[in-house]
Amino acid sequence: MLNGFVASRSWQSRLRQADVLKRWPEVVGPAVADHSRPVKLLGDVLVISVDSSAWATQLTYMTTTLCAQVNEAFGGPVVSRIHLQVDTR
């Protein structure tokens, strides 16, 4: 019943995005989560904010692994690409 309600409102993508954001530390582990945070899911592109250019470089080499970890955690193809941005605050 709830699934039908969610589907009728087209909320699946918003709920999936919220779940990815909430479960980030569990999905990628504490080392990566301490230096990054998912910002939004735009279709199949996950936007991740990192705390330094060094971590942006590190995660650039890990994008395939990160996509696989997210997809495995959610039981299907959720993310096909990752866009990294350095948080300059």
Image (spheres, rainbow, N blue to C red):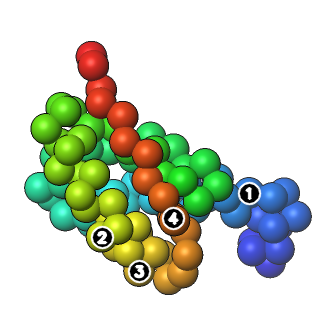
Q: Which residue is mark 2?
A: 65
Q: Which residue is mark 1?
A: 11
Q: CA distance from mark 2 to mark 3?
A: 10 Å
The quadrant in which residue 77 appears is bottom right
Is residue 52 rendered to the left or right of residue 2? left
Q: Is residue 18 visible?
A: no
Is residue 64 rendered to the left or right of residue 21? left
Which mark is drawn over residue 79?
4
Marker count (numbered): 4
Q: Which residue is mark 3?
A: 72
Q: CA distance from mark 4 to mark 3?
A: 10 Å
Sequence order check, earlier mark of 1 and 4: 1
Name the residue: 34% across, 73% down: 69
Crowding at mark 4 (Cα within 10 Å: few <14, some 14-19, many 20+): many
- Tag 2: amino acid: Thr
Label 2 secondary element: helix
Q: Of discs 3 and 1, which sits in the foreground?
A: 3
- Tag 1: amino acid: Trp
